[in-house]
Amino acid sequence: MAHQIYYNDKTKKHSFFSVELRPWHNLGQIVKDYPTSREALEFAGLDYTVEKRPLLAYDTLPFNPDGNEEIKVREIEVPNFFATVRTDTNQALGVVGKDYKIVQNADAFSFFDSIVGGDGIMYETAGAIGNAGERVFITAKLPDYIKVGREDLIEKYLFLTTSHDGSGSITAAFTPTRIVCNNTLNMALRNCTNTIKIRHTDSAQDRLKEAHKVMGISNMLSTQLESIFNQWAKVRITDSEVKKLIQLAMIPNKEVLRNIQTNNLDELSSCFNNICDTCYEYAQVNPTQQTDTTKGTLFGFYNTISGYFQNVRNYKSDEAKFKSIMYGTGLLRTQAAFDLCTDFVKNGEVMNN
């Protein structure tokens, strides 16, 4: 299954819910109104607990072939390692060490509740992915907007992801989303971060209580981004500058950069050129790029890059898309676009370095 949304054989439901919209291959539960954290757990099929259980190996003991003794199986406990098991289905989620501390789904969701005291936060999606639902995610919309120009509104989201298989930290992050085209404008400002990572250790529960840090990050980034985006929306750029900025944002390696710096465009691969041409076409003709704040502006270029990864590029699966935008190539290229815009404002021209 390309989507990798967990399907619970006991409940006959996919572990996913969404408010009003149904992405993820039309799977999961759709609800009309924004739920509470407790309701979100139930809608997404995440209202279960996880236990650490001893990890066992098995050995068959020899028996007397001339007698009638049955084959005996001996359990051998593996020291310092445990299996994480969800109690509703008894499925093993992963193997962890003795210091690994489980953070239950309910505790992770209550982390979001504590961010704004339960008032104003709106749970929009949540679900589990993987063979046994070992990875869990939730997105929540915060009150208010980032406003660019007179009519371009950007919603403010928090997302949290955690796993029960020992593969990674709990991650909480802030990301703004432009309403007009649903672009995830995911970036980290220079010398700032939009994420908090919490390890599955003894301190995990204590650190989850420090929710105000995430809210502080969100408020700081919201204020800064509103100022930055409004500045970019007033900076006019030419079509040739758009093309050059797209090339620089999409650079996959130093060799391509050298060819662009030396204007040796014949040496650029057809794949790279096709990507850049697709981005440029998106910038020129997509209706979402024709607003007063985007058409022929630096803010429009930035939205072109984020919009390409959000709305144009083809992915092998929805999980691959999520990873690209939030952690992978999509994030790296969007960050590159953010830095290029910052340099353009500072220098008044496209910088090749």
Image (cartoon, rainbow, N blue to C red):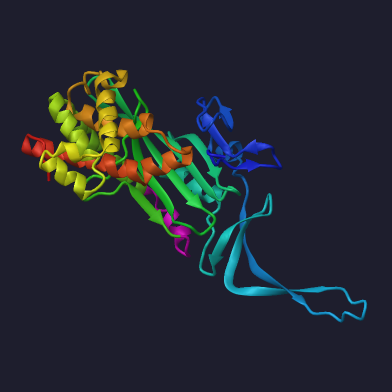
Instruction: Residue at 43%, 60% (x, y): give it.
Output: 199
Residue 21 place in picture, x, y as percent: 50, 26
Q: Is residue 103 magenta?
A: no
**Is residue 192 shown above or below 22?**
below
The quarter holding residue 72 reads bottom right
**Residue that appears at 28% across and 39% down:** 334
Residue 93 vs residue 351, the one in the foreground: 351
Q: Is residue 210 magenta?
A: yes
Give the left or right position of residue 177, taking residue 109 as reference: left
The residue depicted at 37 percent of the width and 28 percent of the height is 182
Which residue is pictured at 13% across the width and 27% down the height? 240
Residue 18 horizontal/vertical position (percent) = 52, 31
Instruction: Give the residues drawn in magenta, as a range.
Output: 200-213
Can the viewer see residue 341? Answer: no
Describe residue 77's horizontal placement relative to residue 151 as left or right.
Answer: right
Residue 187 visible in the snapshot: yes
Give the mark count: 0
Nearer to us in this view, 319 or 198: 319
The part of the image, by quadrant, that contains residue 330 is top left
Q: Position of residue 238 (x, y in %)?
A: 12, 25
For the N terminus, give its image quadrant.
top right
In the displayed structure, 98 sits above or below 107; it is below
**Quadrant housing residue 31:** top right
Q: Position of residue 346 (x, y in %)?
A: 9, 39
Q: Is 45 placed left or right of 178 in the picture?
A: right
